[in-house]
Image (spheres, rainbow, N blue to C red):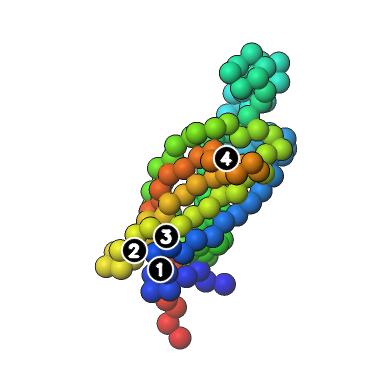
Amino acid sequence: MQGKTIHQLKIGDRDYFSKTISESDVYMFAGITGDFSEIHVNQQAAAKTIFKERIAHGMLTAGLISTAIGVRLPGSGTIYLKQELNFLKPVKIQDTIRAEVEVIEIFPEKNQVKLKTCCFNQQNEIVMDGEALVMPPKAQST
């Protein structure tokens, strides 16, 4: 199903995607990206850090924003152009993360939308925020 077009979106529209981060998610992400930093995959080494335990990769968490955009709002057919991120709190294994997106600006002449992007943990603490610029799908001609 095609996502919302520029003409179907309005400022304030919002949606989200939630996922519990598992140990296997962290290891699979490490394998895909090659980022085997000890803070993610070695409990003994991670225990010596400020976090005292392993944490998920920041970009794994950011990937949930991509899902919210590509699956929820605007949805299928959306092209990701830009993402700014601020990493505010660590995401731990077994945290449930809610990635939210909200339309904050619409540029019809460019078919672009600016989204506020935020990720929250299960305590509703913000762990990441930022902004994204996307191109929603164009209307399909019939």
Of mark 4 and mark 1, the one earlier in the sequence is: 1
- In this view of the protein, can residue 116 be seen by the observer? yes
Q: Quadrant of the N terminus?
A: bottom right
Q: Which residue is mark 2?
A: 106
Contact between labelled residues 3 and 1, with CB atoms less than 8 Å apart: yes
Q: Is residue 32 above or below residue 79?
A: above
Residue occupying image coordinates x 50% and y 69%:
3
Q: Is residue 14 above or below residue 57?
A: below
- Give the distance between the C-alpha atoms of the residues marked 3 and 4, in whole angstroms: 21 Å
Residue occupying image coordinates x 46% and y 43%:
129
The three-letter amino acid code for the residue at tag 3 is: Val
Q: Which residue is mark 1?
A: 10
Of mark 3 and mark 4, the one earlier in the sequence is: 3
Contact between labelled residues 2 and 1, with CB atoms less than 8 Å apart: yes
Q: Which mark is residue 125?
A: 4
Mark nearest the camera among 2 and 4 is 4
The three-letter amino acid code for the residue at tag 2 is: Ile
Of mark 1 and mark 3, the one earlier in the sequence is: 1
- Give the distance between the C-alpha atoms of the residues marked 1 and 3, in whole angstroms: 7 Å
Contact between labelled residues 4 and 2, with CB atoms less than 8 Å apart: no
